[in-house]
Image: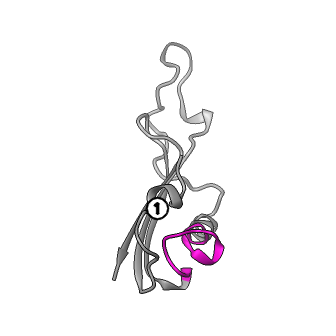
């Protein structure tokens, strides 16, 4: 897992930005089959995560982590975010828990 200081090597952004965030949440055990097919996802396992934490709480802490005012290094302040696209979904077999954050200058 990485934080913004490890991933972002540019200068602090001081103008408007567009953010796209994909949150990858752990799957509950109930999403998996048992017995002979243990470890396989059930056919009716959800893709999107309708449980806690709330997406607005995830976004708020992510923006704080990017903001210089809160110890981040990407944007001067989270008020610079003028457009936001995000989703919260369960991980697939090839993913780990975390988030992918894309920051685009407007």
Q: How many marks?
A: 1
Question: Which residue shows up at 45% across the image and 84% down it?
Answer: 14
Percent from the top left, x then y, of residue 80?
49, 84
Quarter of the image holding residue 30?
A: top right
> Circle 1 sits on which residue?
87
For the C terminus, which image quadrant? bottom left
Relative to residue 55, is residue 6 drawn left or right?
left
The answer to which of 84 and 76 lies nearer the viewer is: 76
For the point 59% across and 66% down, which residue is it? 65
Residue 100 in view (yes/no): no
Residue range of the region highlighted in magenta in the rendering: 63-78
Can you give x and y, in whole percent of width and height, for residue 84 in the image? 44, 75
Establish if 88 lies above or below 19: above
- Quarter of the rendering containing residue 3: bottom right
| SS state under label 1 | strand
Residue 67 visible from this viewpoint: yes
Q: Is residue 44 magenta?
A: no
Task: Judge the density around disc 1: few (<14), some (14-19), many (≥20) Cα neighbours within 10 Å.
Answer: some
Give the colour scheme of this rendering: one colour
Does 51 sit above or below residue 32?
below
Residue found at the far top of this picture = 36
Q: x, y percentage for residue 98?
A: 53, 50
- Asked if residue 63 lies left or right of residue 9, the reply is right
Q: Position of residue 23 (x, y in %)?
A: 50, 56
Q: Is residue 65 magenta?
A: yes
């Amino acid at each position: 897992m990485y934080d913004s200081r490890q991933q972002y090597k540019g200068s602090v952004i001081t103008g408007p930005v567009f953010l796209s965030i994909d949150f990858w949440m752990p799957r509950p055990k109930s999403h998996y089959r048992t017995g002979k097919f243990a470890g396989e996802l059930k056919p009716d396992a959800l893709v999107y995560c309708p449980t806690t934490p709330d997406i607005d709480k995830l976004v708020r802490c992510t923006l704080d982590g990017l903001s210089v005012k809160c110890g981040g290094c990407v944007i001067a302040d989270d008020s610079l975010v003028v457009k936001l696209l995000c989703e919260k979904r369960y991980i697939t077999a090839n993913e780990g828990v975390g988030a992918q954050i894309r920051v685009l200058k407007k």
